[in-house]
Amino acid sequence: AHLQNGSFADKRILKPETAKQMHSRLYGTDDRLNAMAYGFYEESRNGKRIIGHGGDTVFFHSDLHLILDENVGFFVSYNSAGQGETSPRTILFEAFLDRYFPFTPLAGEKAEHAMAEAKEIAGFYKGSRRFDSSFLSLTTPLGEPRVIANSDTTISVDPLKGANGELKKFEEIAPFLFREVHGQDHIGFKKDAAGHWQFQLDYPFFIFQKVGLLENKFFNIGLSIFGLGVLGLTVLLWPVAAIVRKHYSKQLGYTPSDSRLRLLARIVSILFLVFYVGWLSVLSLSDDPNGINGLPPWIVALGILGVICTFGTTLVWLNAVRSLRNPTRWIWTKLHDLVLALACLALVWLAFTWNLMNFNIHY
């Protein structure tokens, strides 16, 4: 019906003007790239204006493509996401276009400052389709694509890969407009109102915004590895050190209050590990339609545990301060107590940043 502007055979489901408005370009962030229509989005390729819509559930993955000027429609639905680095739906439709509508892209203009521009836009970006206010915001830094400036003045965007599993390369064909080498995929870069870089792919239903250090994927992952690694080693070596001291009949020589603080610091470390392992377990259930409905009690319980860990961090810091001020304390003990306090502080910051303690059960 959409190929005939709202009618099929002798039946009409839409007025012609309604169908034409649904098919028209209504909103785009970059005039050089595809834009949103109404109920559809542009996905033009092979010199043809194409509109379509894709949809995914846990079990089915479908695409609809309409080549209006050619009166051609293409629909495909899979009962799995398929294997490999590229969607099989995409490969199938592109092969269909190349078979029936062959096309050779025009050569782009040679960019004079391609290397400098590639380096300027390189970095990590976050998607506009993301979680901001729930525990699922944890997935935002983990899913950040990375723009890479290659030595041959092209760019790559990890994880955009071809059917061969290799990262695609894009060459600049206009200022901050890139096209896939030996292909047709486009990436357009521009600055937003605040002067920050953003880019759009051929799919106009989201954009990607460049992030700073604190939102950087490597920074967040590195900080979490540091924090959990220090706490894990502390808990793991705690009984080992006790066994060694007992074997050699050595005593710590701590005052009762210092011994209590040392014990509390290690208990807080255990609670932090339970807290983060618990959240990893919750995230593992978030893809299961049945499991995700049972998450609210866990979200509340883990949120309470996170608050306990946050207040417990003050005890870890008090232990570190006392250790640093004690002239008889071994230098490596002082260093460990300080690093342990920093690790706890890092994990508290990550918990706040990733909304792991906001008790929000709407996700």
Image: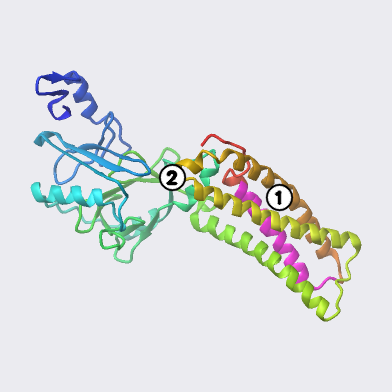
276 over 256 or under it: above or below: above
Dot placed on the residue nearer the N-terminal end, 1 or 2: 2
**Which residues, given as a range, are shown in magenta?**
329-351
Residue 185 visible in rendering: no
Location of residue 9 in the rendering, given as x and y in whole percent from the top left corner:
9, 23
Indicate the secondary structure of the residue bearing disc 1: helix
Three-letter code for the amino acid on which mark 2 is drawn: His
**Residue most extreme to the right:** 255
Location of residue 81 in the rendering, given as x and y in whole percent from the top left corner:
32, 50
Q: Verify whether residue 59 appears in magenta.
A: no
Q: Mark 1 sits on what residue?
A: 309
13 over 59 or under it: above or below: above
Three-letter code for the amino acid on which mark 1 is drawn: Cys
Q: Verify whether residue 340 appears in magenta.
A: yes
333 over 276 or under it: above or below: below
Q: Mark 2 sits on what residue?
A: 196
Location of residue 323 in the rendering, given as x and y in whole percent from the top left corner:
82, 64
Residue at 14% from the left image edge and 48% from the top image edge? 96
Q: Residues within 10 Å of mark 1 (few under 14, many from 20)?
A: many
Q: Which mark is residue 150?
A: none
Instruction: Report whether 84 appears left or right of 263.
Output: left
Instruction: Report whether 288 appears left or right of 173.
Output: right
**C-beta proximity under 8 Å, tags 1 and 2:** no
Q: Quadrant of residue 322?
A: bottom right
